[in-house]
Image: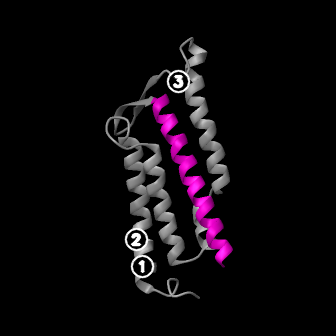
Amino acid sequence: MSTAMGSLILRTAARFLLPLLLLFSVFVLLRGHDEPGGGFIAGLVGAVGFALYMFAFDAARTKTLLVIPPVVMVGVGLFAATASGILPVFVNLPFFTALWWPVELPGFGEVKFSTPLIFDIGVYLVVLGSVMKIVLALAEAEE
């Protein structure tokens, strides 16, 4: 057991900060349409949360916490980002033209779902999956 894994303070902080960092990453993802932010920086913030958790515990425990393997995240993200650009072509608009659909959500009212949001979610998944694959590979090589 390494010294980092034995640190009660780090383990406690990681358990507390991971959900907060993931929530903040979703905030940054959704905020990116009107103000600075978006999929890339949100994916990095999410990856930092999981990396902190991995430093506190280990790579195997972090992999189980991820639920979706990083390689699958990258594939789904690439598909979503590509699909967001292709969707307008089906309604006779140029590639990557932004489309919006109003969606009624109970308790929230009308929310605009859009191809830029689909693109940002794709970028989020690609960045999160790529960074986590690299970090987990490095941690497993060390162990």
| Placement of 68 over or under 123, stated as above or below | below
Q: Nearer the viewer, mark 1 or mark 3?
A: 3
Residue 126 position, x and y percent, is 57, 47
**Near-viewer residue (138 or 17):** 138
Q: Residue at x 62, y 40 (%)?
A: 78
| Nearer-N-terminus badge (3/2) | 2
**Circle number at residue 96:** 3
Question: Is residue 72 found left or right of 132 in the rendered image?
Answer: right
The spot of residue 114 in percent (x, y) is 46, 29
Q: Which residue is mark 2?
A: 16
4 versus 94 height, above or below: below
Query: Quick one: quadrant of the N terminus?
Result: bottom right
CB of mark 3 within 8 Å of CB of mark 2? no
At horizontal 51% and vertical 67% (from top left) the residue drawn is: 51
Label 3 SS: loop
Q: Residue type at mark 1? A: Thr
| Dot in front, 3 or 2 | 3
Count neighbours of disc 3 (C-alpha within 10 A) and say few if under 14, some if 14 to 19, many if 20 or more: some
Q: CA distance from mark 1 to mark 3?
A: 44 Å
Give the residue pinned by disc 1.
12
The residue range painted magenta reads: 114-143
Q: Is residue 141 magenta?
A: yes
**56 vs 62: above or below:** below
Q: Residue at x 54, y 16 (%)?
A: 94
Is residue 125 on the magenta stretch?
A: yes
The majority secondary structure of the magenta stretch comes to helix
Label 1–label 2 contact, CB within 8 A = yes
